[in-house]
């Protein structure tokens, strides 16, 4: 019996360690699976915004080419309304990735958010006017208000 004791003791220590490794692997897989719907939801919302811009020719420049808000009140309201949609997605939907451990898509989305805020005066102005609505975007705003 004394001969079996060291082997049994070693096995009893190794077995739970192996189970922890399997559990960690399952957790990693679960995290990756959880990141997929969050990323898909954000991408779907971005596609919807692009479709809205197609319906309103000329609005793209307000979001990516540095063109300021239009003077015409109807066009202005339309551009601001369209800007609210990506602000919601970028300010609330995308940060969900930070809540999913191991999600690799959070970094590219952060770069995308910085780019859109730098290139789009409508989105940038909207976030500056209502920082309490999109606190996650406020921290990504360019330092220079005229940029």
Image (cartoon, rainbow, N blue to C red):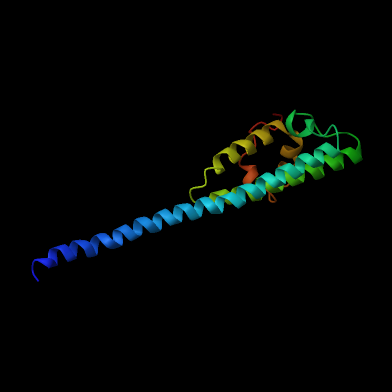
Tell me, yes or no, if residue 135 can be seen here.
no
Question: Image point 61% across, 52% down: which residue?
Answer: 37
Q: Residue at x 91, y 41 (%)?
A: 74
Number of marks drawn: 0
In the visual, does 68 lie left or right of 4? right
Q: Residue furthest left?
A: 2
In which quadrant of the rendered image does the C terminus lie? top right
Identify which residue, 67 or 22, lies in the foreground.
Answer: 22
Query: Which image quarter is the N terminus in?
Result: bottom left
Q: What residue lies at 64% left-to-right and 48% top-to-bottom?
A: 40
Q: Report x, y in % for residue 136.
A: 62, 46
111, above or below 15, in the image: above
Query: Viewer-proximal residue, 119 or 57?
Result: 57
Q: List x then y, in percent, for residue 129.
A: 74, 44
Q: Which of the 4 image quarters holds residue 16? A: bottom left
Q: Give left or right: position of 140 versus 47.
A: left
Residue shown at 56% from the left, 42% from the top: 105
Which x, y percent locates residue 137? 64, 43
Kindly tell me whether residue 43 is visible in this rendering: yes
Whether residue 127 sits left or right of residue 56 in the image: it is: left
């Amino acid at each position: 019996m004394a001969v079996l004791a060291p082997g049994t003791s070693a096995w009893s220590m190794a077995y739970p360690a192996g189970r922890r490794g399997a559990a960690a692997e399952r957790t990693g897989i679960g995290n990756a699976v959880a990141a997929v719907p969050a990323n898909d939801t954000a991408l779907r919302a971005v596609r919807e915004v692009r479709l809205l811009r197609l319906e309103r020719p000329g609005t793209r420049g307000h979001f990516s080419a540095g063109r300021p808000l239009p003077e015409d009140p109807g066009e202005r309201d339309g551009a601001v309304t369209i800007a609210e949609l990506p602000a919601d997605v970028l300010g609330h939907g995308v940060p969900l990735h930070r809540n999913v451990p191991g999600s690799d898509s959070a970094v590219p989305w952060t770069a995308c958010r910085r780019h859109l805020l730098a290139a789009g005066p409508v989105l940038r102005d909207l976030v500056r006017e209502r920082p309490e609505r999109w606190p996650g975007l406020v921290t990504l705003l360019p330092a220079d208000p005229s940029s």
